[in-house]
């Protein structure tokens, strides 16, 4: 989702003291890539290798044999950890094909159908409550695949939790249509959903004094508005900005998800102005609004395990406690599915797309067979957002169509746009749709430069969430509702 950017000249700036302390960091020429994570992997595989060295050399080094040795339970806890470390180190040493084969072998350690059938037969034959309870317990044990026990063993080794998260990330990319790998992924997802329950997570603020490695990860994980330089990063962590992330106690150096917040006056209407590095720093005590302008999931292996709704609610509480003057909590969000939807409606010649006066206005600007064709031609112009003669007349048309897309277009009961679904399911309402709010190449390509303010009213979050989750009802301001009905 990140924008493609050419690094600016300000990349030669001296990084903060915490970054200078990291000799291997150097001066980056682009957002942090795999280098940081490769270094971390080399460090931890070295630890695993040291632990594995104590495992008897007479044991078979094959993957299946190592898995069986881990499951056998021979020796004490130290031996079990060392075997798990050896298996993890083996996986890390494999190429892509080898890792796929590893996961396929692991998936074979499924429940024993014969044992399940026998346990179920005992349950059916149970004559009293005590026998039934014992049979149910035995059936549950029989149903648990041995591979689940092995995955749990990995949590006992250094960075074992992160290892399982990375295992699932790999699995998600290769399991296509393979029932064995799909079943293994389901086991991993269930385990991780329990281990990463929000009750176990820690909310931390990230600022310019945070450790160098963490700041570098922030740059690498940003998925909405690419961080282009250290100056850009410092701007996002200044006194009128906030950045919060969820961490797990077993992955203390790895953010799971983070949100960036601007403390401003009023609802923000341009992401370019919000991220302007030359803009003066505002006094946060004079701000009356907190604008959530970027939220990024950091761990591919935790896909489908939602933290975002809890993160936003926790940050609202944190900011309310720190700044009594902030009464408005809202986002400045893209509409990434808008252009795709709009282009489809144009191709299919949707006669409800444009009003008669809109068609006339468009044809006056761009002679074409229809108003929709004229709209498509105008939007295909390379720099239409910079041409006031084009952009100004398009504004009300695009804003109205954006309102229709957000409030009327559906994917089942949920909003068609993924970002809209995220915020509506979290209890927000569509407050305002803004034209020319993101004039970047990505913003124009995906959202026709539109952005949305989703409002989080603390006293309405829960009721909004319940109505959307239960009935698919989308909350919106009166103005947005009016636009969606086709009236400006």
Image: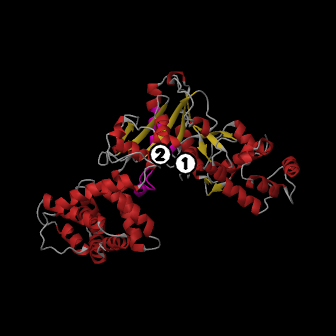
Image: magenta residue range: 294-317
Indicate the position of residue 116 as horizontal and vertical percent values.
30, 73
Indicate the position of residue 453 as horizontal and vertical percent values.
62, 39
Which residue lies at the image location 12% right of the left edge and 74% below the top edge?
58
The answer to whether residue 416 is left or right of residue 46 is right
Indicate the position of residue 126 as horizontal and vertical percent values.
26, 69
Residue behind mark 1: 422
Can residue 287 be seen here? The reply is yes
Residue 257 located within the stretch drawn in magenta: no
In the image, is residue 354 above or below residue 284?
below
Residue behind mark 2: 308
> Which one is in front, 228 or 131?
228
Which residue lies at the image location 15% right of the left edge and 73% below the top edge?
59
Q: Mark 1 and mark 2 in contact? Answer it, CB < 8 Å.
A: yes
- The circle on residue 112 is none
> Which one is in front, 221 or 150?
221
Residue 307 located within the stretch drawn in magenta: yes
Can residue 484 be seen here? The reply is no
Indicate the position of residue 127 as horizontal and vertical percent values.
25, 68
Which residue lies at the image location 40% right of the left edge and 48% below the top edge?
256
């Amino acid at each position: 989702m990140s924008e493609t950017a050419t690094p600016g000249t300000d990349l030669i700036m001296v990084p903060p003291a915490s970054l200078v302390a990291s000799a291997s960091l150097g001066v980056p020429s682009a957002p942090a890539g795999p280098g940081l994570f490769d270094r971390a992997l080399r460090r931890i595989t070295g630890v695993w290798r040291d632990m594995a060295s104590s495992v008897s050399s007479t044991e078979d080094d094959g993957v299946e044999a190592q898995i069986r040795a881990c499951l056998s339970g021979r020796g004490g806890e130290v031996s079990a950890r060392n075997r798990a470390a050896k298996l993890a180190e083996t996986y890390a040493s494999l190429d892509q094909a080898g890792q796929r084969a590893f996961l396929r072998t692991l998936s074979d350690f499924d429940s024993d159908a014969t044992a399940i059938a026998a346990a179920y037969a005992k349950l059916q034959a149970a004559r009293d409550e005590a026998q039934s309870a014992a049979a149910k317990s035995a059936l549950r044990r029989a149903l648990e695949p041995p591979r689940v026990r092995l995955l749990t063993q990995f949590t006992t080794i250094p960075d074992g939790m992160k290892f399982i998260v990375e295992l699932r990330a790999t699995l998600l990319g290769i399991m296509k249509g393979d029932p064995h790998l799909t079943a293994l992924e389901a086991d991993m997802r269930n385990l991780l959903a329990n281990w990463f329950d929000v009750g176990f997570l820690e909310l931390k603020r990230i600022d310019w004094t945070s450790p160098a490695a963490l700041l570098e990860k922030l740059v690498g994980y940003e998925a909405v508005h690419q961080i282009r330089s250290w100056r850009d990063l410092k701007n996002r962590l200044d006194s009128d900005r906030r950045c919060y992330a969820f961490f797990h106690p077993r992955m203390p150096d790895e953010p799971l998800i983070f949100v960036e917040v601007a403390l401003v006056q009023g609802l923000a209407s341009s992401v370019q102005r919000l991220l302007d590095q030359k803009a003066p720093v505002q006094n946060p005590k004079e701000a009356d609004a907190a604008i959530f302008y970027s939220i990024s999931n950091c761990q591919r292996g935790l896909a489908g395990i939602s933290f975002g709704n809890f993160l936003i609610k926790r940050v609202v509480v944190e900011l309310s406690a720190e700044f009594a003057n902030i009464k408005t909590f809202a986002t400045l969000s893209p509409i990434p599915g808008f252009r795709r939807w709009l282009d489809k409606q144009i191709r299919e010649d949707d006669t409800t797309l444009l009003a008669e006066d809109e068609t006339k206005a468009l044809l006056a600007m761009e002679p074409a067979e229809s108003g929709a064709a004229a709209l498509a031609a105008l939007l295909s112009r390379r720099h239409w957002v910079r041409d006031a003669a084009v952009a100004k007349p398009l504004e009300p048309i695009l804003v109205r169509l954006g309102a229709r897309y957000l409030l009327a277009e559906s994917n089942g009961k949920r909003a068609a746009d993924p970002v809209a679904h995220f915020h509506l399911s979290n209890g927000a309402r569509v407050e305002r749709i803004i034209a020319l709010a993101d004039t970047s190449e990505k913003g124009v390509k995906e959202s026709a430069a539109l952005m949305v303010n989703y409002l989080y009213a603390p006293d309405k979050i829960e009721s909004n969430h319940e109505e959307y989750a239960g009935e698919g009802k989308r909350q919106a301001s009166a103005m947005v509702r009016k636009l969606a009905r086709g009236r400006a």
